[in-house]
């Protein structure tokens, strides 16, 4: 019997596996993929993430400390930062690197293994697994579910009923580029309703082009790609488009008897940008710490594991809440309101108070969000947008008080 079974070898699962195996616990990691980490992603991480979970330098494509934002009316705004904020990395290799370190520390990886059932009782945890040619099962004292967005395993573990309703869909492809040297972010209904589109150069010749939206993505990415091509920014596609979901809210409960939930499976992506690698890794680390305490004491009850939820709420609960209400406020604005908002928010003077101020952080958005909506110029502008927008402003301000 293993000490811990981890389902999903993404950022959350690999960090949990590394922490547990480094302390000598018997860990099994199960993933239906054969290519660890090859899940749809742009690969932008903050420097804080790269310090906490180091990235070998050869896996870093480039620094990403500035971007051009394009408002719905086509106006361009250059935005810098107050120092090194983010990196564009080879995400598949980065996640693989953590997995390899976990394997060296003793974790056993079972790839091509799809978990199809979960049972928990007083004796332990049993997961049913399907491979390409047989069915088998694995047993452990504890289970970490880090199986990503929309995983049905939460329902099997009694942690969720009903379908995911609060999420966005992301779509992305890799393209050849001309004339794009820095990240470009496109806002407006024509490209990405309620969210944004992006061009993120990886080097001088390749970029990720993608977008996300709450709406079903029917031809949005293709239309965006054609627009960029007609402007002479990009050339041919290098890879076929892929799409996948991004959660916007944590699930109601992230622990049960013998079970913890981490990463996208728990709903831990930043609701503002959809970035989820860092919080997935942080939650994998916290899940491992809680699992170790349970293994030491032999108490695997939900009551004992509840401290995991207290831990992640303490670290990034406030961020998720404020970010969620900021997203709703953003979504409530129409294109002409977004044009006016961006004109003021991205003016050199307001940038000094917000994105260029010393407390701006790529990974922690709540301070900048709250500064923005309380800003002496921006607050009256948002309020002037009227009754469709102001209730969301009120909810956002209230969310920051808890
Ligand atoms: C288009 C797009 C772009 C993004 N760009 C960024 C970005 O630039 N920066 C950023 O920080 N975040 C980004 N994200 C979000 C980020 O990719 C996720 O938040 C992050 O990967 C979550 O990590 P995780 O470990 O929780 O889950 P995942 O990375 O999804 O890993 C889950 C793993 O579980 C496995 N699995 C699922 N079900 C089973 C099963 N039944 N049995 C066995 N294995 C199973 C999967 O194969 C997968 O390997 C992006 C997301 C999208 C959709």
Image (tube, grey):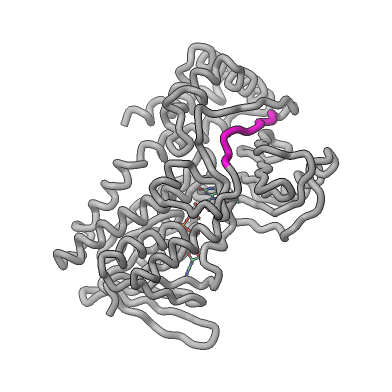
- The image shows residue 120, relative to residue 338, as above or below, that is below
Q: Which of the 4 image quarters holds residue 4? A: bottom left
Residue drawn at point x = 53 percent, y = 71 percent: 33
Question: Which quadrant of the figure has residue 351?
Answer: top right
- First to last magenta residue range: 63-71
In the rendering, at what x and y percent does residue 221 appear?
72, 49
- Identify whether 141 is placed above or below 226: below
Q: Along the horizontal axis of the image, is 86 left or right of 193?
A: left
Tell me if I can see residue 209 in this picture: no
Q: Position of residue 49 (x, y in %)?
A: 43, 46
Question: Residue at 16% of width from left, 65% of height from top?
Answer: 296
Quadrant of image for the N terminus? bottom left
**Membership of 65 in magenta stretch:** yes
Q: Position of residue 344 (x, y in %)?
A: 60, 17
**Seen in the image, is 202 located left or right of residue 13?**
right
Residue appearing at x 62%, y 44% in the figure = 213
Q: Is residue 279 left or right of residue 173?
A: left
Query: Please, is residue 321 above or below residue 102 in the view?
Result: above
Give the residue displayed 64% in from the left and 26% down from the top: 338
Asked whether residue 315 is drawn in magenta, I would say no
């Amino acid at each position: 019997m293993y000490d811990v079974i981890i389902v999903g070898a993404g950022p959350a699962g690999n960090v949990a596996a590394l922490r547990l195996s480094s302390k000598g616990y018997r860990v099994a990691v199960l993933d239906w993929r054969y290519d660890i980490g090859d899940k749809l992603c742009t690969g932008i991480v903050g420097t804080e993430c790269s310090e906490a979970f180091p990235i070998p330098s050869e896996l870093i494509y480039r620094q990403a400390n500035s971007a051009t934002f394009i408002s719905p009316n086509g106006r361009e705004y250059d935005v810098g930062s107050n120092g090194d904020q983010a990196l564009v990395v080879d995400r598949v290799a980065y996640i693989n690197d953590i997995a390899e370190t976990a394997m060296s520390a003793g974790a056993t990886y079972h790839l091509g293994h799809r978990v199809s059932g979960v049972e928990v009782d007083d004796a332990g945890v049993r997961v049913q697994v399907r491979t390409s040619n047989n069915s088998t099962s694995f047993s452990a004292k504890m289970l970490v579910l880090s199986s990503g967005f929309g995983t049905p395993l939460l329902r099997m573990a009694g942690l969720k009923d009903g379908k995911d309703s609060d999420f966005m869909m992301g779509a992305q492809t890799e393209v050849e580029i001309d004339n794009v040297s820095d990240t470009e972010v496109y806002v407006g209904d024509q490209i990405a309703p309620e969210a944004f589109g992006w061009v993120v150069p990886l080097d001088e010749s390749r970029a990720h082009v993608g977008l996300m939206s709450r709406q079903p993505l029917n031809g949005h990415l293709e239309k965006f790609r054609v627009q960029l091509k007609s402007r002479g920014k990009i050339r041919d596609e290098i890879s076929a488009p892929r799409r996948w979901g991004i959660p916007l809210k944590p699930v109601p409960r992230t622990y049960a008897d013998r079970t913890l939930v981490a990463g996208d499976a728990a709903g831990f992506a930043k609701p503002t940008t959809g970035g989820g690698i860092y919080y997935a890794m942080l939650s994998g680390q916290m899940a491992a710490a809680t699992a170790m305490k349970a293994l030491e004491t032999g108490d695997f009850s939900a009551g004992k594991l509840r401290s995991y939820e207290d831990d992640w709420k303490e670290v990034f609960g406030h961020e998720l809440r404020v970010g969620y209400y900021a997203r709703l406020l953003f979504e409530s604005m129409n294109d002409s309101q977004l044009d006016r908002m961006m004109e003021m928010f991205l003016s050199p003077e307001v940038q000094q108070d917000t994105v260029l101020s010393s407390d701006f952080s790529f990974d922690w958005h709540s301070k900048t969000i709250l500064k923005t909506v309380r800003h002496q110029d921006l607050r009256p502008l948002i309020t002037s947008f009227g009754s469709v927008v102001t209730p969301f402003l009120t909810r956002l301000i209230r969310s920051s008080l808890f």
